[in-house]
Image: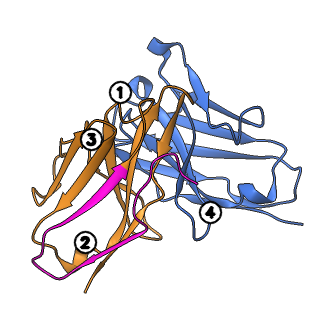
Chain colours: A blue, B orange
Amino acid sequence: EVQLVESGGGLVQPGGSLKLSCAASGFTFSGSTLHWVRQASGKGLEWVGRIKSKANRFATAYAASVKGRFTISRDDSKNTAYLQMNSLKIEDTAVYYCGSGGDLDSWGQGTLVTVSS
Amino acid sequence: QSVLTQPPSASGTPGQRLTISCSGSSSNIGINTVNWYQHLPGTAPKLLIYDNNQRPSGVPDRFSGSKSGTSASLAISGLQSEDEADYYCAAWDNSLNGLVFGGGTKLTVL
């Protein structure tokens, strides 16, 4: 069974940093693309970015709203993907989901990030 | 404002057939495939349709997808109360070099 478990969410002040983790199991993690998607309260889903597999040179892509502030990485030896978030803004407050596969065929339950002073 | 346009809400009665539209442009739906996701608040979103009209294993055949030009549609036949959820379309956008979602459609089963 495919499982994705996000962790690392919490309360952080504007301008601060936070690193989220996405622990995966039940599929060939090293060969899969990993995405991060967020949802602010009362809003729709917003794609944050993705990282491809080693075979695809760990290519990353980001939404314009987070480019230059967020970085996605992965450790295939730990079956874990990460989302490093710097220079956080109030508008980054959301539930953050990780999803696997080019089609986002499996998702985690999400972790809440609150940016507030 | 989302790159892909969906109606914010839709409603139907049990047993009814209903469609949800998703309008995009030549840089996304016009040249890339469309996926649909079902999301119940507080839960993990679920892939419902991929590659415009393909159903993952376990998704009932009551759900179907189609695409024409720069628009796509999700059809749900034999509507059930358990179908009450938010539905999102998504496609890669070559101009933005990113995945774009529709704003979501909240489906109510009356």
Gap in angstroms between the C-alphas marked 3 and 2:
18 Å
Magenta residue check for B109: no
The residue stretch that appears in magenta: B1-22
Q: Which residue is mark 1?
A: B31
Amino acid type, callout 4: Ala
Gap in angstroms between the C-alphas marked 2 and 4:
23 Å
- Is disc 4 in the same subunit as disc 1? no
Residue nearest the observer in this picture, B97 or A49: B97
Residue shown at 81% from the left, 53% from the top: A89
Residue shown at 45% from the left, 44% from the top: A99
Q: Nearer the viewer, mark 2 or mark 1?
A: 1
Q: Which residue is mark 4?
A: A40
- Is disc 1 in the same subunit as disc 3? yes
Residue shown at 31% from the left, 33% from the top: B33
Callout 2 crowding tier (Cα within 10 Å): few <14, some 14–19, many ≥20: some
Magenta residue check for B17: yes
